[in-house]
Amino acid sequence: MAVGAQEGHGEAERPQEGPLGPEGPTAAPEAVADGTADGETAPKAAKQRSFWKELPLLIGIALILALLIKTFLVQAFSIPSDSMQNTLQRGDRVLVDKLTPWFGSEPERGEVVVFHDPGNWLEGEPTPQPNAIQKVLSFVGLMPSAEEKDLIKRVVAVGGDTVECKGTGPLKVNGKALNEPYIFAGNTPCSTDPESQFKITVPKGRIWVMGDHRQNSADSRYHQEQPGGGSVPVDKVVGRALVIAWPLNRWDTLPVPSTFGQPGIGTVASAAPGTLGALGAAAVFVVRRRKRR
């Protein structure tokens, strides 16, 4: 769906300077430092390139840098629908961190992420045909790409989590009810539509996503018949949306809501016995060594 430019200018020719003699700049040197004898002239410095000759090179460097930034660091994406209201409005531009996933970091609960269509979620949606200029701008990340079919939703649960919603809510993750002030005004956390009722344990390596406009978002709830029960593979995630960059009057960050940090919501409890066992074994080892001494 759907960043940088730079400009430069030529440098005026600098006057040539000879080395200063012991009597000051007006003294006539008997033999100058570059090896020319008295009366001979040194060769002139090569004429510098003009601005217009350097301009294509500067433009090329700018495009390469923009492409590298788009591919590995940050890319701008446009919001095409109302499914994330009021957090995101139609037409907003968000900057997405694409670097973190390269280091194997998986999405976390509460993050707003962009991901590739995992299984024809956008089937039937119209795809606009861009002109040549739009194709160039989208190639370097300065505008959305019409060819890429990406979605943006909030991560509600990650691999190993049990997520459920019945009736009008609340939405629960690992048995903990979420307080969701970011939900669109007038919406309920869940829907009375039987098709959108669910209780699922998210498979490892996948995430469960939902829109903040719960009654206007065709998210994981409506794709439970697909492999993974509506969850999205982690390798489909492009990156995390960090800020709303445009329009300027809507500039804002997209932090993780505090409700996802409440005690007990994580699945670390399952790993606790192993951790406690390791700590206990270490303590026994230390005690036995002290007794021997």
Image: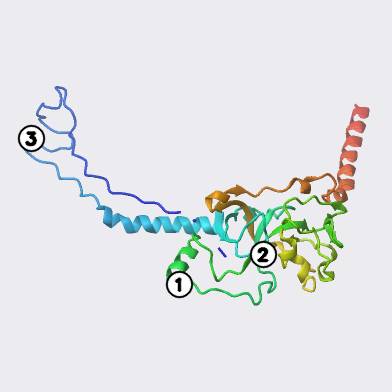
Label whose residue precedes the other's in the sequence (2 or 1): 1
SS type, badge 2: helix
Mark 3 residue type: Asp
Quadrant for the C terminus in the image = top right
Instruction: Residue at 23%, 44% (x, y): give it.
Output: 12
Mark 1 residue type: Asn
Q: Which residue is mark 1?
A: 131
SS type, badge 1: loop
Residue 39 shown left or right of residue 44 in the figure: left
Label at residue 38: 3
Q: Which residue is mark 2?
A: 236
SS type, badge 3: loop
- On screen, residue 127 above or below 269: below
Residue 110 shown left or right of residue 69 in the figure: right
**What is the spatial separation of the Cα atoms under label 3 and label 2, in whole angstroms?**
74 Å
Identify which residue, 286 or 238, lies in the foreground. 238
Q: Are marks 3 and 1 in contact (CB under 8 Å)?
A: no
**What is the spatial separation of the Cα atoms under label 2 and label 1, in whole angstroms?**
27 Å
Q: Position of residue 108 (x, y in %)?
A: 73, 53
**What is the spatial separation of the Cα atoms under label 3 and label 1, in whole angstroms?**
66 Å
Instruction: Residue at 47%, 56% (x, y): give it.
Output: 66
Residue 147, picture quadrant: bottom right
Which tag is nearer the camera, tag 3 or tag 2?
2
Label whose residue precedes the other's in the sequence (3 or 2): 3
Q: Are marks 2 and 1 in contact (CB under 8 Å)?
A: no
Instruction: Residue at 81%, 64% (x, y): give it.
Output: 191
| Outermost residue toward the left in this view | 39
Label at residue 243: none
Label whose residue precedes the other's in the sequence (3 or 1): 3
Mark 2 residue type: Lys
| Outermost residue toward the bottom in this view | 124
Q: Position of residue 4 (x, y in %)?
A: 46, 54
